[in-house]
Image (cartoon, helix red, strand yellow):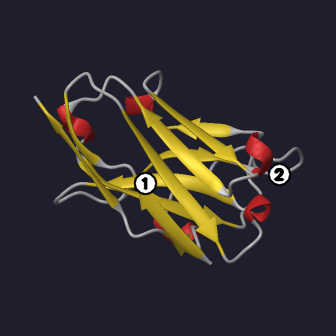
Amino acid sequence: VQLQASGGGLVQAGGSLRLSCAISGGRFSDYALGWFRQSPGKERELVAAISWGGISIYYTDSVKGRFTISRDNTKSTVYLQMNSLRPEDTAVYYCSATHNTWGVPGTTPTAPPFPDQYEYWGQGTLVTVSS
């Protein structure tokens, strides 16, 4: 399974970016997906996650109302639309995939928050927000 992330770049505070992550080599609909980010000296943190079929969505508190995660099963791609960007959003952003069935009726409603709970990773794309 391969994940290819794109869409990072330099943007001024208040601006927007859309990250994309194309997944190949597996059945896209089998995966729950997540976007993590990591800035220097900090641990990798889960920013947003979306379950099978987009049934459930998670956002970390700092991005609620500004970021939107979505998935297109026809294109095997997951997106992260980032609006009202802030300098503290500056980080390398990673897309990830897991077979975890969180968010599906009858399973846990909680998105797996730790990097080691995701089996597959993209290469990371740098987002820099200037003040």
Q: Is residue 20 visible?
A: yes
Residue 72, percent across and down? Answer: 69, 46
Residue type beneath disc 1 = Phe
Question: SS for tag 1?
Answer: strand
The residue at 17%/59% (across/down) is 40
Residue 81, percent across and down? Answer: 47, 35
Mark positioned earlier in the residue sequence (1 or 2) = 1
Q: Is there a contact, CB below 8 Å, between mark 1 and mark 2?
A: no
The 10 Å Cα crowd at callout 1, few under 14, some 14 to 19, many 20 or more, is many
Single out the residue that lies furthest toward the right. 106
Q: Is residue 86 above or below residue 76?
A: above
Residue type beneath disc 2 = Thr
Direction from residue 107 to residue 47 in the image, left or right: left
Residue 104, percent across and down? Answer: 82, 47
Q: Is residue 119 above or below residue 20?
A: below
Direction from residue 53 to residue 113 in the image, left or right: left
Residue 57, percent across and down? Answer: 65, 38
Single out the residue that lies furthest toward the left. 131
Direction from residue 36 to residue 98 in the image, left or right: right
Single out the residue that lies furthest toward the front. 75
The residue at 77%/69% (across/down) is 27
Name the foreground residue: 41 vs 52. 52
The residue at 57%/68% (across/down) is 118
| Quadrant, the N terminus | bottom right
The image quadrant of residue 98 is: bottom right
Q: Which residue is mark 1?
A: 36
The 10 Å Cα crowd at callout 2, few under 14, some 14 to 19, many 20 or more, is few
Q: Which residue is mark 2?
A: 107
Q: Is residue 112 visible?
A: no
The residue at 42%/25% (across/down) is 66
